[in-house]
Amino acid sequence: MHGADAVFFDGTLWRDDEMVRAGLGQKTGKRMGHMSMSGPNGTLAAFADLYISQKNFVHMNNTNPVLRPTSPEKAEAEAAGWIIGHDGMEIVL
């Protein structure tokens, strides 16, 4: 992916245990096949050294704090160069 004009990557969960903590299920993100955004094995860390012109998170679960406009998690993702997808979003390359 290094050098790509754009990447769209699954952003279902901020934390691996997000659904468990919210009392919405017993499965972790990893167990459901999702890579969490945060943490040492998360997307932010995995993509940190890759040059990608535009990094977009899509497919966020409604429990994901990046969907809250003023959350520290959204600020962290954006500081790492990520765009948080939203309904009606248009992409221009």
Image (cartoon, rainbow, N blue to C red):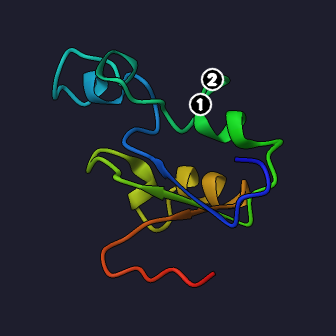
Query: Disc 2 marks which residue?
Result: 41
**Does 26 sit above or below residue 75?**
above
Identify the image quadrant of residue 90. bottom left
Q: Looking at the picture, how far across and down is residue 67, in whole percent?
A: 39, 59
Label 2 crowd (10 A; few <14 / some 14-19 / many >=20): few
- The reply to whether dot 2 and dot 1 touch (C-beta < 8 Å) is yes
Residue 61 tag number: none
* Mark 2 to mark 1 CA distance (whole Å): 4 Å
Q: Badge 1: few (under 14), some or many (20 or more) residues near its Cα, within 10 Å?
A: some
User: Residue at left 62%, top 53%?
Assistant: 77
Residue drawn at point x = 83 percent, y = 42 percent: 49
Specify the amino acid type for callout 2: Asn
The percent position of residue 33, horizontal first and vertical second, equals 35, 24
Residue 16 x %, y %:
43, 24
Question: Please, what is the three-letter code of the amino acid marked with disc 1?
Answer: Gly
In the image shown, does 34 or 67 lie closer to the viewer?
34
Q: Secondary structure at mark 2?
A: loop
Q: Is residue 61 above or below residue 52?
A: above
- Foreground of the two, 11 or 52: 52
Q: Establish if 70 lies above or below 90.
A: above
Secondary element under disc 1, as helix, strand or loop, is loop
Residue under pointer 1: 42
Q: Residue at x 79, y 46 (%)?
A: 50
Question: Seen in the image, is 5 located left or right of residue 11?
Answer: right
In the displayed orientation, state which residue is furthest to the left.
24
Quadrant for the C terminus, please.
bottom right
User: Whole-percent x and y of residue 7?
Assistant: 58, 57
